[in-house]
Amino acid sequence: MSSRSLRVFVAGHRGMVGSAIVRALQAEGDVECVTRPHAGLDLCDQQAVRDFFARERVDQVYVAAARVGGIHANQSFPAEFLYQNLMIAANVIHQARAAGVARLLFLGSSCIYPKFASQPIAEGALMTGALEPTNAPYALAKIAGVMLCDSYNRQYGTDFRCLMPTNLYGPGDNYHPTHSHVIPALLRRFHEARQDGAERVAIWGSGQPRREFLHVDDLARACLLTMRAPVSAYRDCTGPDGTHLNVGSGDDISIRDLAGMIAAVVGCRAAIDFDASMPDGTPRKLLDSGAIRRLGWQARIGLEAGLRSTYAEAVRSAALASCPAEAAPDAACGAAGHAAAPHANV
Ligand code: NDP
């Protein structure tokens, strides 16, 4: 019998989630991580993905590669968000099955759920109502990924699993001035306000909406636990017709309180002005993560402690000092216009 360790392909290993999964796998020490940078393997390229899987003979796949961004990026590039995320999901899932991959974990997002889903959002709310229009193209691509996993499982007997994480933050996040999510956007905003000695910081929206956040290292533990669970345990949690599991901290916070917490973490004393004339989005977005907790997972990193370590890492790595370049067709830093204020609509 071969004694080789499990070969695990982490797609998107340079991203926030992929790098956290690689850290978690390496900490466990019993797997060989197979990785490719985007420049070395474009997952939208069907032939390249086919060749990769045929050559590498991997045992498991974590699909953490995606075209990801905040509301501004989703609204500016809806075609790329739909096309690229569809292609990544279709190519990776199809070629993984063709190459006989034993198990795969596909990462979606809580935005797959209807805009007006009842709270906390249970897995069964999928496709029961209309999507939030601002990120519908991205959400549809993620729903297609979930359906691909479910369809291949039904038709080919594969063991492809899906997790839908809530809003994430942590080391390796994207601090782009216009294309980032709310936590990195606010960290940048308060960091710059402190450096500039600004007396006021403006934030779009009323500050009333409540959102849930999860540290990416907690998500990585959830990914490994989900992948390593016996089929019967995973199926017990999803239910016989279930297609995926939610993963969230279980706690939500208003954007107003989040902004205050981030200002304190950064040491910024500026007054915060909420511009209630800007749209707020969904009033509340909290996942029901009871099923994955039954599998034995729960979040360990509290929001304030997680924000402190995330800010320290962002300063240390100079992520806040410079503007990360983005791949075409996104404009280079500044060319798309600097947002007047971070938008709380996540
Ligand atoms: P990142 O943008 O940090 O990382 C995505 C990675 O995917 C990058 O390394 C990127 O490479 C790579 N990638 C993108 N397109 C391609 C491609 N065509 N071929 C190869 N590689 C590609 O995103 P996150 O880590 O934040 O997100 C990962 C997953 O987690 C996504 O599926 C997302 O939906 C999910 N998720 C994230 C949340 C969040 O708050 N961040 C919340 C909920 C779910 P490059 O940068 O070089 O293009």
Image: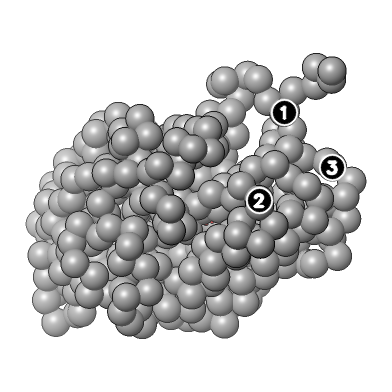
Crowding around mark 1 (Cα neighbors within 10 Å: few <14, some 14 to 19, many 20+) is few
- N-terminal label among 1 and 2: 1
* Residue sitting at x 19%, y 45%: 251
Q: Position of residue 1 (x, y in %)?
A: 84, 18
Camera-nearest residue between 278 and 299: 299
Distance of label 2 from label 3 (alpha carbons): 19 Å
> What residue would you read off at disc 2?
158
Asked whether the beta carbons under mark 1 and mark 2 sit within 8 Å of each other, the answer is: no
Coordinates of residue 247 in the picture (x, y in percent): 36, 47
Q: Amino acid at mark 2?
A: Thr
Mark 1 and mark 2: Cα distance apart in space: 18 Å
How far across and down, in percent of the image, does residue 133 sit? 36, 82
- CB of residue at label 2: within 8 Å of ligand 1? no
Confirm or deny contact between disc 2 and disc 3 (CB under 8 A): no
Residue at position x 29%, y 47% from top? 289
Give the amino acid type for the residue marked by disc 3 in the picture: Glu
Q: Please give the label number shown on residue 6.
A: 1
Q: Earlier in the sequence, mark 2 or mark 3?
A: 3
Query: Left of 122 or right of it: where is 70?
Result: right
| 157 over 31 or under it: above or below | below
Asked if the residue at tag 3 contacts the one at tag 1, i.e. Cβ–Cβ closer than 8 Å, the answer is no
